[in-house]
Image (cartoon, rainbow, N blue to C red):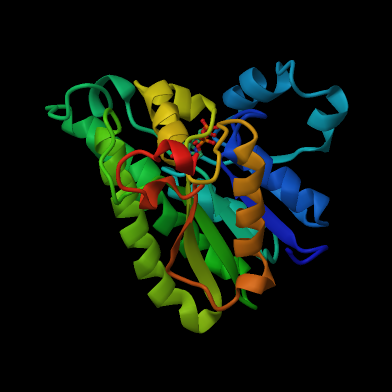
């Protein structure tokens, strides 16, 4: 589904549970040259080098660059260094769980909200501003979002960040369309990763999907299904799709109320 032999940059690898890892390995199996980015060297040491889930062979096969998306120079350097790229995955998000997530929506931790917006939303524009130079013949950029049509308990300011992310994605799609650079958001259902398990009430979110998803959803195995959709969005079969939020979530977010017994 992707273009074999071309380079794809997958940003936001933390460990082998990351959505970035599932997407990167899927693209690699399809013949893509995958460059992962990890936030910094310390994170690689802790979460990749010491990982018990990855074999030494798997670790050695990972091509890794470091990139903190809040540091403009690091993003610039990344895309100058890599040569031409066909696709970029922005699989990055952070919000302080103590202040931006949880039972209370209100907070006076404005700096934490700004940080969450900078990392989780605005960074997409930073990435695209530098990635465009590495895409002289066009390309595809995919960011990861979570349902912004409904309001979930505890997701609070991250929900705001995702709404901003999708608005930024549409602005970028309009701006870069004439360069044949497409930008879309992939809206995944809940998946077991480090970021997800730091959301207070993640298990409630998973059980919501159990009650609402017409297509059975599994927080582990559905990761591969999400990765397959990412590969479709990165590759030429989706070349007239841009500025869209594509839901790969089992259909849960279009359902009102719970599924009835006969629908399960
Ligand atoms: N897991 C889910 O249920 C789910 C569902 C829908 C969307 N998403 C989104 O998918 C994306 C990936 O999350 P994940 O669930 O794979 O978790 P993850 O914890 O594996 O990945 C989050 C990544 O963001 C990176 N990051 C945070 N701050 C950064 C910075 N300043 N610079 C560079 N990288 C930074 C982290 O290092 C980490 O690699 C996020 O945007 C998340 O909101 C997740």
Q: Nearer the viewer, residue 153 or 3?
A: 153
* Residue projecting furthest to the front: 262
Q: Is residue 202 left or right of residue 154?
A: right
Q: Is residue 71 positioned above or below 190 on the image?
A: below
Residue 11 percent coordinates (x, y) = 58, 45
Q: Name which quarter of the figure residue 239 lies in.
A: bottom right
Q: Is residue 135 positioned above or below 216 on the image?
A: below
Residue 216 percent coordinates (x, y) = 55, 39
Residue 116 percent coordinates (x, y) = 32, 37
Q: Nearer the viewer, residue 99 or 46?
A: 99
* Residue projecting furthest to the bottom: 178
Task: Name the residue: 35% across, 38% down.
Answer: 258
Residue 97 percent coordinates (x, y) = 32, 23
Task: Name the residue: 66% across, 38% down.
Answer: 21
* Residue projecting furthest to the right: 57
Task: Name the residue: 83% across, 37% down.
Answer: 61
Q: Where, quadrant-wise, is the N terminus in this rendering?
A: bottom right
Task: Name the residue: 53% across, 33% down.
Answer: 191
Q: Is residue 52 left or right of residue 9?
A: right
Q: What is the total number of numbered labels drawn onto the structure image?
A: 0
Q: Name which quarter of the figure residue 30 lies in.
A: bottom right
Q: Is residue 135 positioned above or below 153 on the image?
A: below
Q: Is residue 163 positioned above or below 103 on the image?
A: below
Decide if residue 214 is in sight here.
yes
Decide if residue 189 is in sight here.
no
């Amino acid at each position: 589904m992707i273009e074999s032999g071309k380079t794809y940059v997958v940003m936001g690898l933390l460990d082998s549970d990351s959505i970035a890892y599932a997407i990167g390995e899927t693209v690699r199996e399809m013949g893509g040259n995958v460059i992962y980015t990890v936030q910094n060297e310390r994170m690689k040491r802790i979460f990749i080098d010491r990982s018990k889930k990855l074999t030494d062979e798997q670790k050695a096969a990972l091509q890794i660059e470091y990139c903190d998306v809040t540091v403009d120079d690091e993003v610039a350097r990344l895309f100058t260094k890599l040569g031409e790229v066909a696709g970029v995955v922005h699989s990055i998000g952070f919000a302080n769980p103590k202040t931006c997530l949880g039972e209370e929506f209100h907070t006076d931790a404005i700096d934490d909200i700004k940080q969450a917006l900078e990392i989780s939303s605005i960074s997409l524009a930073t990435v695209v501003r530098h990635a465009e130079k590495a895409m002289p013949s066009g390309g595809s950029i995919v960011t990861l979002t979570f349902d912004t049509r409904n309001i979930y308990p505890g997701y609070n300011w991250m929900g705001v960040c995702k709404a901003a992310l999708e608005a930024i994605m549409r602005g970028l799609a309009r701006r870069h369309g004439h360069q044949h650079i497409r930008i879309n958001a992939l809206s995944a259902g809940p998946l077991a990763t480090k970021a997800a398990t730091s959301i207070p009430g993640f298990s409630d979110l998973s059980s919501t999907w159990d009650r609402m998803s017409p297509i059975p959803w599994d927080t582990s195995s559905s990761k591969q299904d999400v990765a397959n959709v990412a590969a479709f969005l990165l590759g030429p079969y989706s070349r007239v799709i841009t500025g869209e939020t594509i839901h790969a979530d089992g259909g849960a977010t279009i359902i009102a109320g719970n599924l009835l017994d006969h629908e399960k």
